[in-house]
Amino acid sequence: MKPTIFISRELKEDSIFRTRLEAVGAAVVGQSLIEFTAVDFGEIPPCHWIFFYSKKAVHFFFEGLAGKEVPGRKWGVLGKGTAAALLAQGITPDFIGTGEPEGVADVFAEEAAGQVVLFPQARESRQSIQQLLEGKITAITLVVYDNLPRLSFGLPFCQVLVFTSPLNAQAYFGKYALEAGQKVAAIGDTTAAALHRLGIKKVEVAGEPSEQGLAAAAVELIKGEQ
């Protein structure tokens, strides 16, 4: 039987995750289980760095700026996907992390030690880098969007469930229970820990927090079924 894979994000037709899974005969359902809305944030406070956790933060930050420039700052991002979003705004990041908060915090601490760093983020952000850098930088939180679990959605039975954030996991298991025959993958340790708290004992963690890493994890879970 053709396996169906759920991933908790919207996918383009040519996304690496979709093409990799379809190449091994799987069907893919890509749907975010989070609602996003912009938050007015006013003026940008003085800072040395502006650091983004996600592509969504980049989008809502520049949408809120409405064309205003932010000169004289350095720009940092958690990973490659967020770097691409910043490049699309015409800005080359001064710092690009690997996507894993612990390692990123260690390296970024050397770049920004003692400086003021602005973090545009969601209202429900985990603030992972800020917490890890406590005492090493001066962090300013700037809420630029709201992110809340969706209450109304429907999904087919999927043999593999791939979660890209704790909030997506919370939304899914707030509606569905883990059924017999389903396997679960997470984008990283933070999402895996959230799944454990939700009662999901066995979670495959992607080797890297990217579509390639998520696809590889999903393929391994499919192979385990064969």
Image: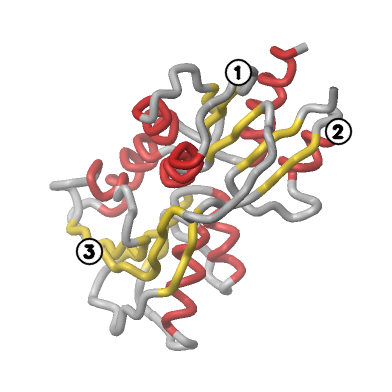
User: Do the residues bearing badges 1 and 2 touch, measured as CB atoms within 8 Å?
Assistant: no
Q: Mark on residue 76?
A: none
Residue count near mark 1 (Cα–Cα under 10 Å), binned few <14, some 14–19, many ≥20? few
**Mark 1 vs 2, N-terminal side:** 2
Q: How is the image coloured?
A: secondary structure
Instruction: Name the residue nearer the viewer: 23 or 28.
Output: 28
Disc 1 vs disc 3: which is toward the camera? 1
Whether residue 89 sits left or right of residue 137 in the image: it is right
Q: Residue 199, how many percent across, how many down? A: 39, 24
Estimate the spatial distance between the alpha carbons at disc 1 and disc 3, rounded to whole Å. 45 Å
Q: Residue at x 50, y 48 (%)?
A: 79
Q: Which residue is mark 1?
A: 180
* In front of the other: 207 or 56: 56
Q: 10 Å neighbourhood of mark 3: few (<14), some, or many (≥20)?
A: some
Quarter the C terminus occupies: top right
> Looking at the picture, how far across and down is residue 186, in whole percent?
52, 32
Amino acid type at circle 1 is Ala
- Residue 147 is situated, as x and y percent measured from the top left of the image, at 41, 60
Residue occupied by mark 3: 140
Name the secondary structure under disc 1: loop
User: Earlier along the polypeptide chain: callout 1 or callout 3?
Assistant: 3
From the viewer's perspective, tell me whether residue 37 is left or right of residue 12: left
How far apart, in angstroms, are the residues tagged by discs 1 and 2?
25 Å
Task: Give amino acid for label 3.
Answer: Ile
Q: What is the spatial separation of the Cα atoms under label 3 and label 2, in whole angstroms?
A: 44 Å
The part of the image, by quadrant, that contains residue 217 is top right
Q: Residue at x 68, y 32 (%)?
A: 158
Q: Which residue is mark 2?
A: 23
Instruction: Name the one closer to the observer, 75 or 121.
Output: 121
Find the residue positioned furthest to the left.
Answer: 135
